[in-house]
Image (spheres, helix red, strand yellow):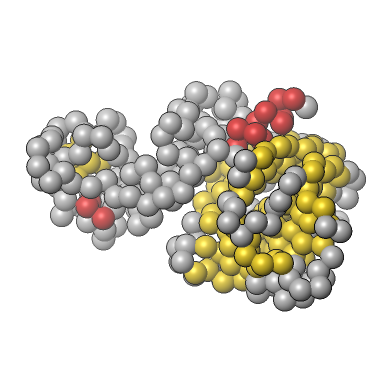
């Protein structure tokens, strides 16, 4: 149990930003020379996305042939690379931990997922199966219940019905009972007349045998705020001071480990974690959930390990 909670706590460290691996105005390494964010290239661009140590490459070239010139490509040797959520110079598609810039801990178990994204940093086999920073339209294949839209690098839910529990989920490509679901969000307004409001992440098994859900949310019920992990066979809560501060940034993580579910929340100056039993089913989809609140999610990150 302590191992699970420690792993979930490690997941909630993150940062958000956007910065290109830019050229230096004067002085600095030349084409083909070693470089870094602190030692940028003089008349070229630093290829931070590897493999190998970073070196200066031609600004107007296109190493990976994806149509993005190196100077505008955060993944110089892999298709994609338009966006860099954590501002570390490595694009979301090729970053081993797209929500945490250095000093994110390096991969120690050789599965190419760096901490704090890796829920099991000493166990090989975890992989990032989805990262979305919501810089484009919401994919048509995602399941949407409630009023969702992508705008300005955020997935936005607008709560109008105080009784509706909304979800925005993606089908999982990997069958696994070892999974982490992470997100960050800001809340703008609680829906008028609501007696219960929440924002968080969810994993769902929606197979013919019956729907089972494990949710992890920051909730306000009867005027009291708490972190809640909830499933059909168990639930647990931890009180928090204020989980609906419009000026606050909330980072939430759910860890599924066979028949155990754990949740962690970083809420500005307060953090905590809870755990509860789950049905032990294999989720078929995962994503975001909200009720009776206007909320803006900055990203969704899924990390899985095969059973």
**Is residue 109 shown to the viewer in this render?**
yes
Percent of width and height locating residue 260: 79, 37
Residue under the image location 46 percent in, 66 percent down: 152
Above or below, 202 against 235 in this view is below
To which quarter of the image does residue 200 belong? bottom right
Rendered-image quadrant of the N terminus: top right
Above or below, 32 against 187 in this view is above
**Is residue 256 shown to the viewer in this render?**
no
Residue under the image location 78 percent in, 51 percent down: 225
Percent of width and height locating residue 179: 66, 41
Percent of width and height locating residue 196: 82, 62
Residue under the image location 58 percent in, 62 percent down: 296
Residue nearest the viewer, comparing 238 with 48? 238
Residue under the image location 9 percent in, 37 percent down: 27
Counting the numbered discs, the total is 0
Residue 232 placement, left or right of 285: right
Residue 271 placement, left or right of 279: left
Rendered-image quadrant of the C terminus: top right
Percent of width and height locating residue 164: 78, 70
Residue nearest the viewer, comparing 214 with 268? 268
Residue nearest the viewer, comparing 191 with 79? 191
């Amino acid at each position: 149990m302590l191992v699970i909670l420690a792993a979930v706590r490690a997941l909630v460290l993150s940062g958000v930003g956007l910065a290109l691996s830019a050229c230096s105005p004067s002085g600095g390494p030349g084409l083909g020379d070693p470089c870094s964010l602190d030692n940028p290239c003089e008349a070229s661009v630093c290829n931070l996305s590897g493999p190998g140590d970073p070196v200066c490459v031609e600004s107007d070239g296109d190493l990976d042939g994806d149509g993005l010139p190196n100077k505008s490509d955060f993944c110089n040797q892999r298709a994609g690379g338009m966006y860099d959520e954590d501002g570390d110079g490595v694009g979301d598609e090729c970053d081993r931990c797209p929500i945490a810039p250095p000093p994110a801990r390096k991969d120690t178990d050789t599965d190419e997922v760096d901490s704090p994204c890796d829920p099991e940093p000493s166990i090989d086999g975890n992989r990032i199966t989805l990262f979305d920073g919501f810089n484009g339209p919401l994919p048509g294949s995602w399941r949407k219940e409630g009023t969702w839209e992508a705008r300005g690098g955020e997935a936005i839910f607008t709560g109008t019905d105080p009784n509706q529990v909304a979800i925005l989920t993606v089908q999982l490509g990997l069958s696994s009972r070892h999974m982490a679901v992470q997100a960050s969000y800001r809340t703008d307004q609680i829906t008028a007349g609501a007696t219960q409001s929440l924002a968080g992440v969810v994993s769902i098994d929606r197979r013919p045998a019956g729907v089972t859900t494990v949710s992890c949310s920051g909730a306000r019920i009867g005027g009291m705020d708490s972190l809640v992990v909830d499933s059909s066979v168990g639930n647990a809560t931890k009180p928090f001071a204020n989980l609906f501060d419009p000026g606050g940034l909330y980072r939430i993580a759910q860890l599924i480990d066979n028949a155990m579910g754990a949740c962690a929340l970083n809420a500005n100056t307060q953090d905590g974690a809870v755990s509860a039993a789950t049905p032990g089913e294999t989720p078929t989809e995962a994503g975001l959930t909200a009720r009776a609140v206007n909320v803006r999610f900055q990203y969704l990150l899924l990390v899985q390990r095969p059973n």
